């Protein structure tokens, strides 16, 4: 049994109305923005599932629903076999020990008026594990590569990379089974990013914790993930192992996304085959009919307008939501 | 100081430029004596991490260092004029006409209260173009940067454009007066990767259309590899390596350049092995010690690295263009690069 199973998870937000009351009214078309549309995924214990996609694809909303920071509109979230999408009160608090989060911005996610030891004590206090907190805090600081004496300092005394280590220590304080990492290294410089990525891999090896790693940087996701899900406009359009996705992308969007990443080696960069997509991401308040990628897809046919492509499982365990790819693989 | 003279008179000459910021804890040496040239039509990239001084260098060239910063040393010469001792009034006529800048965040660089077309027009009328002519050219420019329905979109406000489209508007505005030099500070950092690819294409096309030279400031080595002819690597306010993109990115000499390249996760290999890292953190720029700024983080550091500062020198006598500031440059040249 997978550690986390999500089935047909959907989240609609009310579209923002303007100050003067114009814009769509409740119940009218365009009044809802579907941020996450029928997403089903699984994470096994100890594995890293990478979720990639561009701004507005719903990857952060997905992460927040799993943490129950946002309530899903419909769908099921099962954690260790238990449905958690409707839990409240004590039951919810119990589940929250097991699922934690690390945020993107290491500056705004730590309270500037709390000492590091207070920040790390907070989850322990909330969950009634106040006894031995001091010992646990110095253990946590050592674990993320910081001097336990730093516990008495305030967040502003640390660099971005060190703050992100504190954020990771806080997420691990309760020994969770799953940590949602929402763009954990995108605010960091390359040399610091590498340090934090190495720390995450090392922690996973030692603690057996599973990661849901949300990021827009394809190389970073490739490096850290066992399996990857690619999202576009609220839907998962392809899944596979990291190597499958990167060495043999199937969905046209995945291909375009990978081909858009410039290579730091100038010789390889000059030979890089590029698929430059035309146009912008469509608005999620009025998504295209059928396949949402068809407005930017160079292969689109009539069927792509008419029908929503389903995420179909290939014999080799990959899933692709593309009419053309799936027609080809079923005729093979 | 060394100037690489590939062309007889470079368009831009930066000579021993230094910029300090006065803070309550003392002077922060943001840029510490950098010298380089940009030839007409050439693309030069400045790369480095946060705080390396790359953006401050660009602002210094534009004469736009924000207080409490000030230039303490050196000169910037552009097309044989010395910008650094030019009166403000005079500088203003060059800025936007001969030298134009594209900033990272197009939303805060556009005025939210004015129509996009009018803002492009204003960039031209400010420098003496007649209004009617500027209007026609504004639509042409919007076409050039790939904004569909230009006559209609010109009447829209910045908030009605997406991030990628806004950056296209910024490019249109920057090339409106056919500048000889474009300075782009992290032009695609705020954009998604598929949009970045589009905007970089537009930037190349705009550069080609105007024959402008491009000074590209970025932290993304992939963008450098695709866009630049030459690259300068900055660390702690100094240039620590420079050369053609092939020289610097394929055969890097300086341990910092090597460290940066090695620390990048690759799209092609998924070894899940730990990434090579540069241990420690960048130095604070309050003290400017007579030592290599990388020495505390460098695995190759020897005694001399901690007691004196290396100069930017040719890596080998045959290759004057490739220079590194490292006492162990010759040893490093022998050590193979893994990537």
Image (spheres, coloured by chain):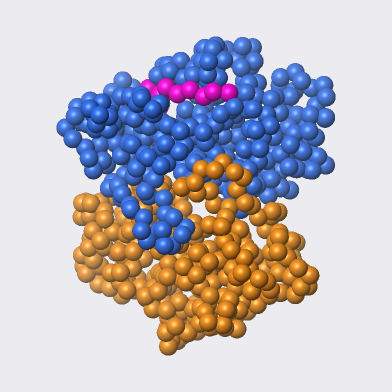
Chain colours: A blue, B orange
Q: Is residue B46 left or right of residue A122?
A: left
Tell me, yes or no, whether the highlighted magenta stretch contains residue A8.
Answer: no
Our reading of the magenta stretch's main secondary structure is strand
Identify the residue at image location x=56%, y=41%: B272
> Residue B52 is drawn in which quadrant?
bottom right
Is A60 situated above or below B269? above
Residue B298 percent location from the top left of the image: 70, 61
Residue A247 percent location from the top left of the image: 41, 42
A131 or A49, which is in the foreground? A49
Identify the residue at image location x=27%, y=48%: A278
Q: Residue furthest left?
A: A302
Identify the residue at image location x=30%, y=72%: B210
> Residue B171 is drawn in which quadrant?
bottom left
Residue A2 percent location from the top left of the image: 52, 19
Identify the residue at image location x=23%, y=66%: B137
* Residue stretch in magenta: A31-45
**Res. A25 in view:** no
Is A235 situated above or below A85? below
Residue A106 percent location from the top left of the image: 62, 42
B123 or A283, which is in the foreground? A283
Q: How many marks?
A: 0
Q: Quadrant of the C terminus of chain A?
A: top left
Is B74 situated above or below A83? below
B170 or A48, which is in the foreground? A48
**Res. B146 in view:** yes
Q: Is residue A187 left or right of residue A132?
A: left
Q: Is residue A240 left or right of residue B249?
A: left
Q: Is residue B181 left or right of residue B31?
A: left
């Amino acid at each position: 049994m997978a550690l986390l199973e999500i089935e047909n998870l959907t989240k609609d937000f009310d579209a923002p109305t303007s100050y003067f009351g114009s814009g769509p009214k409740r119940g009218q078309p365009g009044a809802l923005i579907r941020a996450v549309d029928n997403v089903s995924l699984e994470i096994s214990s100890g594995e890293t599932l990478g979720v990639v996609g561009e701004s507005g694809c719903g990857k952060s909303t997905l992460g927040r629903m799993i943490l129950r920071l946002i309530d899903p509109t419909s769908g099921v979230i099962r954690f260790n076999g238990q449905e958690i999408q409707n839990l409240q009160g004590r039951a919810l608090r119990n589940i929250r020990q097991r699922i934690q989060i690390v945020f993107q911005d290491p500056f705004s996610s730590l309270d500037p008026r709390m000492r590091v030891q207070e920040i790390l004590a907070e989850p322990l206090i909330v969950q009634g594990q106040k006894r031995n907190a001091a010992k646990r805090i110095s253990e946590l600081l050592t674990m993320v590569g910081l001097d336990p004496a730093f516990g008495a300092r305030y967040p502003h005394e640390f660099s971005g990379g060190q703050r992100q280590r504190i954020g990771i220590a806080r997420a691990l304080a309760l020994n969770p089974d799953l940590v949602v990492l929402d763009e954990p290294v995108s605010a960091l410089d390359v040399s610091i990013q590498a340090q934090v990525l190495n720390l995450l891999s090392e922690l996973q090896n030692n603690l057996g914790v599973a990661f849901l790693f949300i990021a827009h940087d394809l190389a970073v996701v490739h490096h850290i993930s066992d399996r990857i899900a690619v999202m576009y406009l609220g839907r998962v359009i392809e899944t596979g192992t990291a190597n499958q996705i990167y060495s043999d992308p199937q969905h046209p969007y995945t291909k375009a996304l990978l081909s858009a990443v410039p290579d730091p080696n100038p010789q390889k960069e000059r030979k890089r085959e590029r698929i430059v997509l035309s146009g912008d991401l469509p608005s999620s308040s009025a998504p295209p009919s059928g396949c949402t990628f068809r407005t930017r897809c160079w292969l689109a046919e009539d069927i792509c307008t008419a029908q929503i492509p389903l995420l179909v499982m290939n014999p080799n365990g990959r899933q692709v939501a593309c009419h053309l790819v799936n027609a080809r693989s079923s005729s093979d | 100081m060394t100037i690489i003279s590939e062309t007889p008179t470079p368009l831009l000459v930066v000579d021993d430029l230094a910029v300090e910021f006065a803070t309550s804890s003392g002077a922060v040496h943001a840029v510490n004596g950098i010298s380089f040239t940009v030839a007409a039509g050439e693309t030069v990239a400045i790369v480095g991490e946060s705080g390396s001084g790359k953006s401050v260098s660009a602002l210094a060239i534009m004469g736009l260092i924000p207080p409490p910063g000030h230039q303490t040393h050196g000169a910037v010469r552009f097309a044989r004029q010395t910008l650094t001792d030019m009166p403000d009034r005079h500088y203003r006529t060059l800025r936007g006409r001969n030298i134009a800048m594209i900033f990272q965040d197009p939303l805060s660089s556009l005025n939210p209260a004015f129509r996009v077309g009018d803002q492009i027009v204003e960039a031209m009328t400010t420098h003496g173009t007649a209004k009617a002519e500027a209007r026609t050219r504004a639509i042409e420019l919007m076409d050039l940067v790939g904004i569909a329905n230009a006559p209609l979109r010109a009447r829209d406000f910045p908030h009605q454009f997406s991030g990628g489209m806004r950056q296209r508007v910024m490019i249109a505005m920057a090339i409106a007066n056919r500048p000889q030099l474009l300075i782009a500070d992290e032009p695609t950092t705020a954009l998604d990767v598929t949009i970045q690819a589009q905007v970089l294409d537009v930037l190349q096309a705009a550069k080609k259309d105007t024959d402008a030279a491009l000074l590209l400031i970025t932290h993304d080595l992939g963008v450098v590899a695709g866009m630049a002819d030459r690259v300068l690597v900055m660390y702690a306010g100094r240039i620590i390596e420079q050369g053609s993109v092939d020289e610097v990115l394929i055969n890097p000499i300086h341990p910092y350049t090597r460290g940066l390249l090695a620390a990048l996760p690759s799209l092609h290999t998924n070894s899940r092995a730990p990434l090579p890292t540069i241990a420690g953190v960048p130095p604070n720029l309050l003290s400017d010690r007579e030592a290599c700024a990388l020495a505390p983080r460098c695995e190759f550091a020897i005694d001399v690295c901690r007691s004196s500062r290396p100069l930017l020198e040719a890596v080998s006598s045959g290759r004057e263009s490739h220079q590194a500031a490292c006492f162990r440059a010759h040893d490093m040249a022998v050590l193979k690069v893994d990537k």
